[in-house]
Amino acid sequence: MINHLIGIITEKSLPSVIVDVKGVGYQVDVPMSTYSELPEKGEKVKLITHFIVREDSHQLFGFLTKEEREVFKEIIKIAGIGPRVGLGILSSYSVSEFISDIESDNHDALVRIPGIGKKTSERLTLELRGKLPKVAVTKPENDGKTDLLNALIALGFSEKEANLKSKNASNEVSLQENIKEALKDHRNN
């Protein structure tokens, strides 16, 4: 198993990055939560990894924390839920928010995740309750700019353009208003 990689980011293209470790480039798929926190190309990074070997593919998944990796591993143990859905879950949630929703049977929040329907959300809560790592269920301090960045990238903005829009966004208005403003500016350009 490849536990972690420490190297230089040579490429970033959602949903993966290429990490050069002493001349070997590893393609690592990452959730949006990790992608948005990664340093720029040419900078050093450490990714906690999970390696999946299948008949037809070998895939390496990367995370910034061990907790993220452990939650991912528990998610993909569930029948019918693969690594893509696992990444989708971790792209939509912080680990603490996901654990909180699992422990409190919050199906309304879970079904908002792409690829998760009512039956899948019920299976998630049934099979994961009590199995996920205990992490503080405090929301990290976030001025909303990371959420805006993730939303704009998901809407098709380039990473550079999304970074610029999120840096220039107002903290005085809601996330939805900032998204509307970014879309309006994008249409006018």
Image (tube, rainbow, N blue to C red):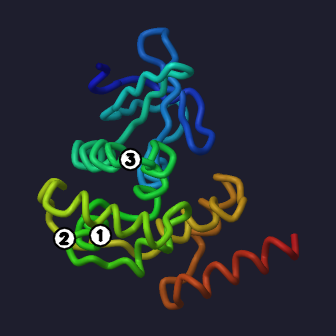
Q: Earlier in the sequence, mark 1 or mark 3?
A: 3
User: Which quadrant, please, contains the N terminus?
Assistant: top left
In front: 98, or 150? 98
Please give the name of the residue rendered at 70% of the width and 82% of the height, measured from the top-left corner: 181
- Return the x and y of residue 111 as percentages of the image width and height: 47, 73
Q: How crowded is mark 1: few (under 14 residues within 10 Å), some or many (20 or more)?
A: some
Q: Name the residue under label 1.
A: 97
Q: In this view, does 182 lie to the left or right of 42?
A: right
Please give the name of the residue rendered at 22% of the width and 48% of the height, measured from the top-left corner: 67
Q: Earlier in the sequence, mark 2 or mark 3?
A: 3
- Return the x and y of residue 96 as percentages of the image width and height: 25, 65
Q: Is residue 27 left or right of residue 72?
A: right
The vertical placement of 42 against 14, above or below, is above
Q: Earlier in the sequence, mark 2 or mark 1?
A: 1
The vertical placement of 91 against 140, above or below, is above
Disc 1 residue type (three-letter): Glu
Q: Is mark 3 on a helix, strand or loop?
A: loop
Q: Mark 2 points at which residue?
A: 137
User: Which quadrant, please, contains the C terminus?
Assistant: bottom right
Say whether marks 2 and 1 touch (CB < 8 Å): yes
Q: Mark 3 points at which residue?
A: 79
Q: Is residue 46 left or right of residue 88?
A: left
- Please tell me how many numbered marks the rendered image carries: 3
Disc 3 residue type (three-letter): Ala
* Furthest-bottom residue in this view: 173
